[in-house]
Image (cartoon, grey):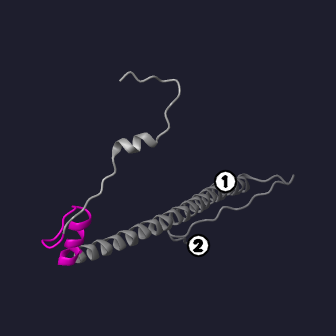
Amino acid sequence: MIRFKHEHKKPKKVVNKEGKKTKTASKRTEKSSSGGFYYSFLTIILLLCLIQITVSAVLNISKIISYKAKIIQITKTRDAALALNDQLKDNINNFSNVAGLEAIARNNLKMSSEDEVLVIINTNKDDEKAEKPKKIGFINYD
């Protein structure tokens, strides 16, 4: 028979009379042991990846919680600042009127209008000192 070049002979399995395996059988066991190592190595890598994914998810969730708390705090601060701004705008509107300016002049600056007389009653500082109890044991040489 004529054989073509692309045809290859398959190795024959040879078994001795004593039942010992030949070289072809030992090659299979080497391949299966290296395949077992390969699969166990891939399993370890997969477990490490799963652990990394789990740790990352936990850390991300904790960051989300802390960021939400910061957002709530900043929102409260912003609302307080807006309320203060509204109050200051109202004060500006009140004090820009003549009545508002007059109230400031009367109360803080002790001013009066042309038709009024301003009377200021001050308490004497010496009277205030006399009301305080004196300390015992100290002598004044004034």
Residue 33 appears in view: yes
Toward the left, the furthest residue is 114
Part of the protein shown in magenta: 95-116
Task: Give whichever of 116, 38 is nearer the camera.
Answer: 116
- Horizontal arrangement in the rendering, residue 44 relative to residue 119 (left or right): right
Residue 43 placement (x, y as % from top left): 65, 59
Give the amino acid at mark 2. Met
Identify which residue is drawn at 18% across, 75% down. Answer: 96
Residue 8 placement (x, y as % from top left): 57, 66
Task: Give whichever of 34, 39 is nearer the camera.
Answer: 39
Give the amino acid at mark 1. Phe
Task: Give whichever of 13, 60 is nearer the camera.
Answer: 60
Residue at the disc numbered 2: 1
Q: Compare marks 2 and 1 and give the one earlier in the sequence.
A: 2
56 in relation to 140, above or below: below
Q: Quadrant of the C terminus?
A: top left
Identify which residue is drawn at 45% across, 68% down. Answer: 71
Residue at the disc numbered 1: 37
